[in-house]
């Protein structure tokens, strides 16, 4: 016996990826409904060997459905998630709306699957920010071994983190570089993204950080440990898919780089590719379409008594969004609902 599943936002990048991953991982689906706004009603998407028609989320009745995977942004989630939750359909939300709500668990299954039982307070589970998700997968096994004190992270985030508009803008601006008569001014981003990097993701806060950077701090504390200190610089780069992170970690006790590498190799969701030779590391282009979070460049930080550096790469549309949501659904089914 399987589940009756809803995918809300099924016409977007993340929603389509959710459908792909549900199929790839053979999630036990008895019935599936695909939703979007009224303007997309009737649009067709595929799931397994089926062609599904998009339904209007405004008119949809969530009663009798087991889970709803939401990829519709905070504003729409604010309206529709409570409706689904009240109908006893558990919402797994990809937006930032509920991530910091103390009554809503924020889940990365490799890190804090046990927290999922807190879903019953609101019938909602939050999916973390894409940049946080891959980082905590790498941090968790190391934290279990040597207790992390502080993390300094610089991100190199692809334009797909801004959705289809961001990808289109990079594509059009890149073509315009070779066509001087064509001008493509920035709309999605604050400056031209083609052949450039922009140290600005989301809005600025009073302390000079951006909201994206604040998210990484707050979410890491909620998922892993409130005592971990985190400072982040988040940068948008001209890459279509795949987020990269340079992570510096300070531990409470010494952790040798070889032991750290071995720990990471044995940890769920991680693939270590770390050869000290040309090409002996993973780049964002190489991680696209893969489930794993890739770790490379593991090495001691000689400026700290107990420090390590590492390079972390993941497909942000997968582990950073759709894959993690499906993994949450799998965990919910296995640990709580127990139908599949």
Image (tube, grey):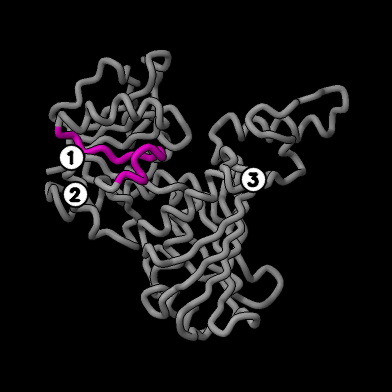
Residue 30 visible in rendering: no
Q: Residue at x 36, y 56 (%)?
A: 222
Question: Residue lying furthest front in this view?
Answer: 206
Asked if the residue at tag 1 contacts the one at tag 2, i.e. Cβ–Cβ closer than 8 Å, the answer is yes
Badge number at residue 333:
2
SS class of the residue under badge 3?
Answer: strand
Picture layout, residue 95 above or below residue 254: above
70 to the left or right of 309: left
Report x, y in % for residue 286. 59, 56
Picture layout, residue 299 above or below residue 207: below
Badge number at residue 279:
none
Classify residue 133 by image quadrant.
bottom left
Asked if the residue at tag 2 contacts the one at tag 3, i.e. Cβ–Cβ closer than 8 Å, the answer is no
Picture layout, residue 56 above or below residue 239: above
Q: Which residues are magenta?
A: 88-101
Residue 47 visible in rendering: yes
Badge number at residue 236:
3
Q: Nearer the viewer, residue 2 or 103?
A: 103
């Amino acid at each position: 016996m399987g589940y009756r599943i809803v995918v809300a936002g099924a016409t977007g990048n993340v929603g389509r990826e959710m459908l792909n991953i549900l199929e790839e991982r053979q999630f036990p689906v008895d019935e599936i409904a695909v939703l979007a706004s009224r303007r997309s009603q009737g649009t067709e998407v595929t799931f397994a060997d089926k062609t599904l028609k998009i339904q209007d989320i405004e008119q949809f009745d969530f009663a009798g459905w087991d889970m709803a995977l939401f990829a519709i942004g905070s504003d729409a989630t604010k309206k529709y998630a409570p409706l689904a939750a009240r109908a006893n359909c558990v919402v797994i939300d990809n937006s930032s709306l509920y991530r910091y709500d103390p009554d809503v668990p924020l889940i990365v299954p490799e890190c804090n699957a046990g927290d999922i039982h807190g879903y019953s307070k609101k019938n909602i589970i939050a999916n973390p920010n894409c940049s946080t998700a891959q980082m905590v997968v790498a941090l968790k096994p190391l934290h279990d071994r040597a207790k992390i004190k502080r993390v300094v992270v610089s991100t190199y985030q692809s334009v797909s983190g801004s959705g289809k508009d961001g990808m289109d803008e990079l594509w059009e601006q890149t073509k315009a570089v070779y066509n001087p008569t064509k001008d493509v001014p920035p709309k999605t981003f604050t400056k031209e993204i083609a052949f450039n990097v922009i140290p600005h993701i989301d809005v600025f806060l009073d302390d000079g950080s951006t909201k994206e950077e604040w998210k990484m701090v707050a979410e890491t504390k909620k998922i892993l440990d409130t005592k971990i200190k985190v400072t982040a610089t988040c940068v948008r780069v001209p890459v279509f898919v795949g987020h990269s992170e340079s992570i510096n970690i300070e531990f409470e006790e010494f952790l040798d780089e070889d032991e750290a590498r071995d720990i990471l190799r044995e940890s769920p969701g991680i693939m270590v590719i770390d050869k000290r030779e040309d090409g002996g590391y993973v780049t964002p282009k190489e991680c696209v379409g893969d489930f794993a979070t890739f770790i490379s460049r593991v090495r001691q930080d000689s400026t700290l008594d107990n420090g390590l550096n590492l390079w972390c790469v993941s497909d942000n549309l997968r582990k950073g969004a759709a894959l993690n949501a499906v993994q949450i659904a799998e965990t919910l089914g296995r640990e709580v609902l127990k139908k599949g």
